Amino acid sequence: GSHRPCAGPPRRALFPPSRRRRGGRGPRGRTGEVAGVGRTSGDPRRRARRGEHEDGGTVRGQGFGGCHRPCHRLQITAGKDDKGLKTYDPGYLNTAPVRSSICYIDGDEGILRYRGYPIEEVAESSSFVEVAYLLMYGNLPSQSQLAAWEFAISQHSAVPQGLLDIIQSMPHDAHPMGVLASAMSTLSVFHPDANPALRGQDLYNSKQVRDKQIVRVLGKAPAIAAAAYLRLAGRPAVLPSNNLSYSENFLYMLDSLGDKEYKPNPRLARVLDILFILHAEHEMNCSTAAVRHLASSGVDVFTALSGGVGALYGPLHGGANEAVLKMLNEIGAVENIPDFIEGVKNRKRKMSGFGHRVYKNYDPRAKVIRKLAEEVFSIVGRDPLIEVAVALEKAALSDEYFIKRKLYPNVDFYSGLIYRAMGFPTEFFPVLFAIPRMAGWLAHWKESLDDPDNKIMRPQQVYTGVWLRHYTPVRERVASNQGEELGQIATSNATRRRRAGSSL
């Protein structure tokens, strides 16, 4: 941010008043105070002079040593050669690298809002395409704006034939998320006009260029996902239709089998649309942080989004609903729930679909999804595991062990049951997560381009290695019994067979 004139030392001390009265000396001779620690109140201009952010509870990290103007550094040192205080924060549990106006979460109260709108309201009344516009541009569109937006997305939904050929050429057992990640990064090859590395760093300063990439991605993402799905069944990709809604079009590409007159069930399409809304955005989660991290380098939008898909591919991020299904299958029946609960308490079993890094209350998305499950079952048939899921939720929410730890159902607890009931294979679940999350990723990409504080992301580290060593020629070295070395590389039977027939 911009430098402000110094106004003397900040008022809030890192150490208790007794230490301040004795001269302000902290442990090991450290001195100084931290602005923004604890309550932030009073005159905003006075808070600004103290280095405090007007958003309560935050302080600029540069104040701990990143600013090169001495008058702006907090005087926290550990010796004459110290470069300032770093914050060691594994997992970024309390680190905010960006300021964003896209999504608000209050985990303690179970609140999720898109641009100020409660998630329950937009899920009930809006459509995914309308929500994507809201996330992207900050307001709900007018009727004419929505029509233009829908038209632009549909006009950019065709996938280049060369990319479809690449998808079809992948191994028959390639995971759909691997296919999606590869396809997203490959789009940059098919659209060199959108690559700052080829067209100049200021390429994305153009609103026209940005908007074109946004509709390109939103249009092509479901078509690429459908192609990845169809290749699992050995079927060719189906061209999208321009006469259907976003979710209807996706189901059409999956199920039409080339019949241009095919119409997906509108109720199932609406369920899918609501699921897309619920998964569209969730502020600085792992994959969104990955997208913003990559985008900070100036890389093209397709490569940045491919990184988001890669992060979502991780089982700790995008694979939780699959883990829920596995857990429910292992429980098997309602009468087995008490034993399972005891196993969880004794740390012998793991409960999936409960708890969240952010939410310490009932995930508001889970409440909506629970209702959607019954809608799907009324159309395609009831999944017997839903009885186990409902009974497990009831047992957990009435058990002091889970209440004390604030473990509530999250968005993944029921979504897997819905996807399975709709006939999607489990390996396709994270793809159904990635399609709508493209909207959130794109909104953050767009926001980062306009952020005056945006810099290439370059976190620091705490070095724990050997301090200094000098090079020894390889002939003079002996094998060290300290540290790691290359282990045994597994050899396949096919390799052994091949080697047996040669001079190797």
Image: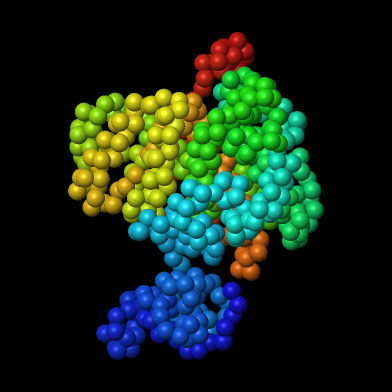
Question: In this view of the protein, which residue sits in the foreground, 465 or 245?
Answer: 245
Rendering quarter of residue 141 = bottom right
- Residue 96's place in the image compared with 40, above or below, is above
- Residue 182's place in the image compared with 291, above or below, is above
Q: Is residue 174 in view?
A: yes
Query: For the point 36% across and 75% down, which residue is it?
Result: 38
- Residue 364's place in the image compared with 423, above or below, is below
Question: In this view of the protein, which residue sits in the foreground, 340 or 456?
Answer: 340
In the picture, measured across the screen, residue 200 lies left or right of residue 149, that is right
- Residue 464's place in the image compared with 182, above or below, is below
Residue 289, position as x, y percentages in the image: 53, 53
Residue 198, position as x, y percentages in the image: 79, 51
Residue 148, position as x, y percentages in the image: 71, 50
Q: Quadrant of the N terminus?
A: bottom right
Q: Residue furthest front?
A: 143
In the picture, measured across the screen, residue 277 lies left or right of residue 93, that is right
Residue 231, position as x, y percentages in the image: 62, 24
Q: Residue furthest top?
A: 501
Query: For the point 37% across and 30% down, which residue is it?
Result: 326
Q: Quadrant of the C terminus?
A: top right
Question: In this view of the protein, which residue sits in the foreground, 411 or 40?
Answer: 411
